Amino acid sequence: MHKKKAKPKLKEDISPNVVPMIDIMFLLLLFFMLGADMSQRESIEISIPKASAVPEPPREEDKTKRWIVCNIHHAPEGGFCAINDNGGVCREEAHWKWSIMGVDYPREEMKKQLQIVGQDYLEDVADEKAGKRLSNYFLLIRADQNAPYGHIQKVFEYAGGAGIYKTSVAANKPVPGT
């Protein structure tokens, strides 16, 4: 008799190659991180003062204007200030923080930072005899409604010294009927 050879059992080992999937996940993660709106990182929760005539906020699609956002916000060391928490105006200097692009700076350092940033994007001047070249940046000051005006005035002073003369203060439109 003729003996048939038994066919060897095929071992089907299905194991997906996960390396390309990991690569794709890293690429997607990188894409979403770079494409995300990073302007929120400099926004601090501030109760902005109300004004009847408020200009439109800067739009993302307006690429011709470069903005510097300076925040003046109340941030006491312990996180508690009885005066501010009860709606009063806190005059304690150490409770007020100044920041540019989400980084807090002491007042002395804020002046230096505005000078550094202001020199990055200077206006084109046809005549060098005109003197000092001014910055082409727009400065938006976002201050808490209870912030002492002296802080805002100081930021204006520092901006002027840095050659940043295009300035504005952020405000909210009042709710109708209030």
Image (cartoon, rainbow, N blue to C red):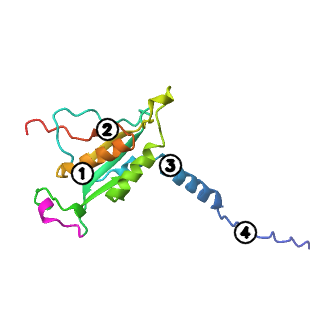
The residue singled out by tag 2 in the image is: 167
Image location of residue 13, percent across then percent down: 69, 67
The residue singled out by tag 1 in the image is: 151
| Residue at 33% across, 47% down | 158
Secondary structure at badge 4 equals loop
Disc 4/disc 1 C-alpha distance (Å): 76 Å
- The reply to whether discs 2 and 4 touch (Cβ–Cβ < 8 Å) is no
- The reply to whether discs 2 and 1 touch (Cβ–Cβ < 8 Å) is no
Q: Earlier in the sequence, mark 4 or mark 1?
A: 4
In the rendered structure, which amino acid carries the disc numbered 1? His
Q: Earlier in the sequence, mark 2 or mark 1?
A: 1
Residue segment shown in magenta: 78-84
Which is more toward the observer, 141 or 21?
141
Image location of residue 45, percent across then percent down: 26, 53
Mark 3 crowdedness (10 Å alpha carbons): few <14, some 14-19, many ≥20: few
User: Which of the two discs, 2 and 4, sits closer to the camera?
Assistant: 2
Mark 4 crowdedness (10 Å alpha carbons): few <14, some 14-19, many ≥20: few
The residue singled out by tag 3 in the image is: 34
Secondary structure at badge 1 equals helix
Residue 144 appearing in the image = no
Q: Earlier in the sequence, mark 1 or mark 3?
A: 3
Disc 3/disc 4 C-alpha distance (Å): 45 Å
The residue singled out by tag 4 in the image is: 11
Image location of residue 97, percent across then percent down: 28, 58
State which quadrant residue 85 falls in. Answer: bottom left
State which quadrant residue 26 falls in. Answer: bottom right
